[in-house]
Structures are given as C-alpha cells and as structure tokens.
Image (spheres, helix red, strand yellow):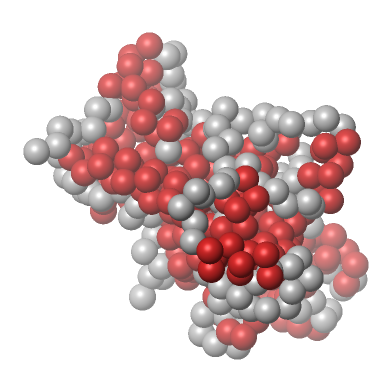
C-alpha cells in the first residue's frame, strides 16, 4: 500500500515564513483540508473560490492539480499518478518528437532488413506520398513553427518565458524554423521556457489532430506551467512538464470548443458564449446593454478574447492566478467565466454609458485596472449555477 504524500514542504514554509494573521489562517485551512487521507473537494472548492494565498510556494500548484481532477482525492495515489504520467508523457515525446525519420537520420540498426533499406532509399524529401517519412517530418515542422511563433511571445511583459529553464532537454528537434535559425546565428543553444511550452503544445497538436494548435493556446498553457514551475516539492519539480501537459489537456476539454470554428454557433462555440454574455448583460445591466446596442458596440468587439483566453490577457499574471483559482473551483467553468465577464462590465459601467463609440471602446481597454478581488466579489453575488 502506498504511503500518504507528504505535505511537510508546505508545513515547513508555514512555520518559518513571516505571514500576516488572516493570510496565515487561510493557509492553515488549506493545509487542514489537504492533510487528510482523502481530500474533501467541495471544501477545497469553497476555500479556493476567493483565491489561494501566494505566500506558500507550491500550495497553488497542488490545489490546481486537485481542482482540475488531475490528482485523485486519495492522497495515497498522488505519487503513482505523477510518476506514471511522467512515463506516459516521455513516451509521447519519444513517439512524436523522436520521429522515425529522426531516428533513421541519427541511428543505425544492424538488424534492419533489406526491404526496409530499399524503402528508405526510395523515399525522397520532395515525395508527396502520404507514407513518406519526409512528408511527415515537414508536416511536423509546420506545426512546430506555428506553435513556436506564439510561444516565443508568451507574456511578453515578463522575462520568464524567454529565460533559460532547469527542465532538461531530452528531445532535441531537427526542425529548421525561423526562430531556431536566428538562435543558431546568435549561438544561442540554451533550453528556454518557451521551448518547453512549444514541446507541450506540439505534443497536444499531434494527439488532437481535429483541433491541432490554434493561436492563443499558449496563453492558456502559460499560467499552468508558471505555477507548476514555481513549486518547491521535489517530485513536482521533476514533473513540471508532464503535469503541465496533462492539466492543459484537461483544461482544454472544456475550452477547445471556443477554438473550433465549426462549432461557433453550437452551444459550446464562441459565438454562442458571446451571445450568452450579452443576454446576461441585458438581464443584469439593462442600462449598459441598451447603450452598447445604441452605440454599435457589439459583444465580439470586447468579449471574444475575454472568453476564448479565459481572461489571461486582461490582467497581470498574479491577477490571472486569482481569477483561475476561482474559475477552477467551479464545476461549470465556462458558465462561471461569463459571470466574471459580466462582473467586469458592471465595474466598468461609468465608462460604458457615454454617447461616443471611441470613448466606450477605450473604457473597455481599462479592464486591467480593476481590482481582481472586486471582480470575484461581484461574481460571487450574482453567479447562478442553475
């Protein structure tokens, strides 16, 4: 029987760091919930709804993994879940990054039969055959470059994602992308955080060909990766990349419909969600709704990015963490997200009642100046789960 996952790394920080009284009380409540053989997820959701304290490194990382359902409620299963998923992710990387072509370019097989040798000789980089190893390689290179163009710009206001990472580069790639060519010219051979994001999103794209990669997914992955990389637990530091991949995959199960144009008008599509927000605005703030209608300020002008990227682009990263603490604590994340958006509009009300289109649009650009705690407070008052 497996032993309980140790929370000593959290408890030690609590006992040694100078933490304000109210915050310390909240952290103690979190640890009390987490320090049980089986976690009461309902209690954890209630406590997380108003934010997870930042004072203890690794607390938010653990809470998010539980709220997403990545870690089971049974604490004895955490170690095996993490180690198994490290192995699963490494196998994906072996299969999808160390491709057949790359193996043949770098490895020899003395037992390779004569027929395979002849097939390799017949294959050619310009071959259009669906079975061509080269075609598969170049198709993968297109995906990699598409992802990399975005990951290199992830949270551009921070230096974090362009800085070197401690995560080992076990899977060197042979793709000749523009970014990689420029780095080679600069003799930049460092393994950087955005390289890890690129690898995760490439694996996701290969395993999910129906959606593949869509611009903006990097911004959804970024908070997960940042939080997990900031952990202090020894096992979790070994599993940052695999944990980020699987948690991103779980998150995208609810979010991916917004990225699929074929589902725009369906109940899960982005157009439906924007219209639903507009309907909520009409019900809760008829004055704002009426004025936006009169001035021609359509929902897609402001809410497309809010909804599609789960408010990741509207606030500094710390604010995003607080919002996501609350989002992840709700069963219906997409519905709750609309109420967060509605709360933002309520807070912006004074700047949305004018008679000038440009002034209103400028007012909608001031989202980042709103206190996130205020948004969460309003949302908790107006949210109707049923």
In the image: residue 335, left or right of residue 213: left
Locate residue 305, reporting x and y percent.
69, 65
Q: Is residue 26 visible?
A: yes
Locate residue 147, reporting x and y percent.
69, 57
Q: Quadrant of residue 27?
A: top left
Residue placed most toward the observer, 354 or 329: 329
Residue placed most toward the observer, 181 or 62: 181
Q: Is residue 286 visible?
A: no
In the image: residue 268, left or right of residue 282: left
Q: How many marks?
A: 0
Residue placed most toward the observer, 300 or 268: 268
Locate residue 40, reporting x and y percent.
21, 48
In the image: residue 354, left or right of residue 320: right
Residue found at x 74% / y 68%:
124
Residue found at x 63% / y 42%:
172
Locate residue 302, reporting x and y percent.
74, 68
Residue found at x 43% / y 38%:
239
Q: Quadrant of residue 237?
A: top left
Vertical relation: 360 (above or below) 174: below
In the image: residue 262, left or right of residue 156: left
- Extreme residue toward the bottom, this view: 265
What quarter of the picture does the C terminus occupy? bottom left
What quarter of the picture does the N terminus occupy? top left
- Extreme residue toward the left, this view: 1
Vertical relation: 163 (above or below) 335: above
- Extreme residue toward the front, this view: 114
Residue found at x 44% / y 20%:
20
């Amino acid at each position: 029987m497996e032993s309980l996952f140790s929370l000593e790394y959290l408890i030690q920080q609590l006992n040694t760091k100078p933490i304000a009284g109210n915050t310390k009380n909240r952290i103690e409540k979190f640890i009390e919930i987490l320090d049980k053989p089986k976690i009461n997820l309902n209690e954890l959701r209630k406590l997380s709804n108003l934010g997870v304290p930042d004072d203890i490194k690794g607390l938010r990382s653990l809470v998010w993994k539980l709220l997403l359902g990545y870690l089971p409620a049974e604490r004895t299963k955490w170690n095996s879940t993490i180690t198994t998923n490290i192995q699963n992710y490494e196998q994906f990387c072996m299969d999808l990054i160390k491709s057949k072509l790359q193996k043949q370019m770098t490895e020899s097989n003395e037992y390779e039969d004569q027929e395979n040798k002849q097939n390799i000789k017949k294959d050619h980089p310009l071959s259009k055959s669906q079975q061509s190893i080269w075609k598969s390689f170049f198709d993968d290179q297109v995906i990699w470059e598409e992802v990399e163009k975005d990951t290199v710009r992830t949270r551009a206001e921070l230096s974090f994602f362009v800085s070197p990472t401690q995560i080992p580069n076990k899977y060197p790639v042979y793709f000749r992308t523009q970014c990689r060519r420029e780095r080679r010219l600069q003799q930049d051979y460092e393994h950087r955080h955005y390289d890890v994001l690129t690898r995760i999103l490439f694996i996701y794209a290969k395993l999910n060909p129906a959606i593949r990669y869509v611009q903006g997914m990097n911004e959804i992955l970024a908070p997960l990766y940042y939080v997990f990389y900031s952990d202090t637990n020894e096992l979790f530091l070994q599993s940052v990349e695999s944990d980020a991949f699987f948690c991103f995959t779980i998150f995208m199960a609810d979010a991916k419909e917004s990225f699929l144009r074929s589902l725009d008008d369906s109940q899960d599509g982005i157009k439906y969600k924007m219209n639903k927000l507009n309907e909520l605005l009409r019900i809760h703030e008829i004055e704002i709704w009426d004025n936006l209608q009169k001035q021609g300020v359509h929902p897609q002008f402001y809410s497309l990015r809010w909804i599609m990227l789960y408010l990741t682009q509207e606030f500094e990263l710390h604010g995003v963490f607080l919002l996501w603490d609350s989002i992840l604590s709700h069963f219906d994340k997409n519905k709750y997200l609309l109420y967060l958006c509605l709360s933002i509009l309520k807070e912006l009300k004074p700047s949305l009642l004018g008679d000038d289109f440009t002034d209103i649009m400028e007012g909608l650009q001031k989202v980042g100046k709103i206190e996130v705690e205020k948004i969460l407070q309003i949302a908790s008052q107006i949210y109707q789960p049923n």
